[in-house]
Image: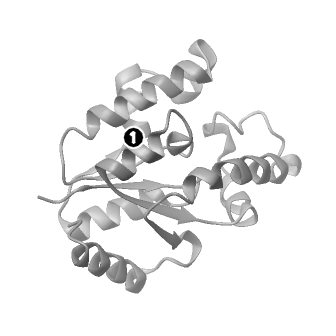
Amino acid sequence: MAKNIFLIGYMGSGKTTWGKKLAHRTNLPFVDLDAALVQHFQMSINDYFEKHGVDAFRLEEQKMLHKVSEKQGQIIACGGGTPCYHNNIDWMNEHGMTIYFSATAEQLHSRLKKDRSQRPLLKDEKEANLLGPITLQLERRVIDYSKAKWSIDAFNLNATKLNALIDYLKEINAL
């Protein structure tokens, strides 16, 4: 039985986009943790943050991570902060394969400036000031991201590199 494969990295790094492609290529189910939370809350993550706060969200996020992980053999795209709270990165490493979608703050800024209104931690930032908060938060989070079992350059990912990743996952019996 295949293990769960947890995709981690900063928001905008491509976890959902590439996770769907990886799931399609491996015939494994795809789970977007943020989408599961939105369905569970019956409200957007932005609205949940505003109504209940970040701490409440992080606890619910951990519960949902454990719940969706009860089934094995899935590709799970985690929220950008998921691995950084409540020892989630250690838990994911114990219960599956973690892959860090690595990117620089400048690369992430180029993507996130377009849709920051959908990102609770960036929605109130002006575009001209956006790089600073992304850089600061990425520097704090990379400590947890770097604990992933595998790292991939999110901005240079292509079909050939996806095939190499799939071969690697088969080699280590993660698929």
| Front position in the image: 93 or 139 | 93
Which residue does the image show at 67% across and 38% down from the upper left? 117
Q: Is residue 126 left or right of residue 7?
A: right
State the image coordinates of residue 56 (x, y, percent, origin top left): 53, 18
Image: 16 above or below 25? above
Image: 86 above or below 161? above
Spot the residue most to the left: 1
Type of colouring: one colour
Q: How many numbered markers are drawn?
A: 1
State the image coordinates of residue 5 (x, y, percent, origin top left): 32, 57
Q: Characterize the local packing of mark 1: few (<14), some (14-19) or many (20 or more) Cα atoms within 10 angstroms.
A: many
Spot the residue most to the bottom: 160
Spot the residue most to the right: 128
Image: 95 above or below 87? below
State the image coordinates of residue 131 (x, y, percent, origin top left): 81, 54
Which residue does the image show at 42% across and 82% down from the upper left? 161
User: Disc 1 residue type?
Assistant: Leu
| Front position in the image: 5 or 118 | 5
| Front position in the image: 22 or 169 | 169
- When asked about the image quadrant of residue 21, the answer is bottom left
Residue placed under numbered mark 1 in the picture = 33
Q: Is residue 107 left or right of residue 133?
A: left
Which residue does the image show at 37% across and 60% down from the upper left? 19
| Front position in the image: 54 or 120 | 54
Task: Name the quadrant of the C terminus.
Answer: bottom left
User: SS for tag 1?
Assistant: helix
State the image coordinates of residue 151 (x, y, percent, origin top left): 50, 69
Q: Is residue 85 left or right of residue 91?
A: right
Task: Name the quadrant of the N terminus.
Answer: bottom left
Q: Is residue 33 left or right of residue 31?
A: right
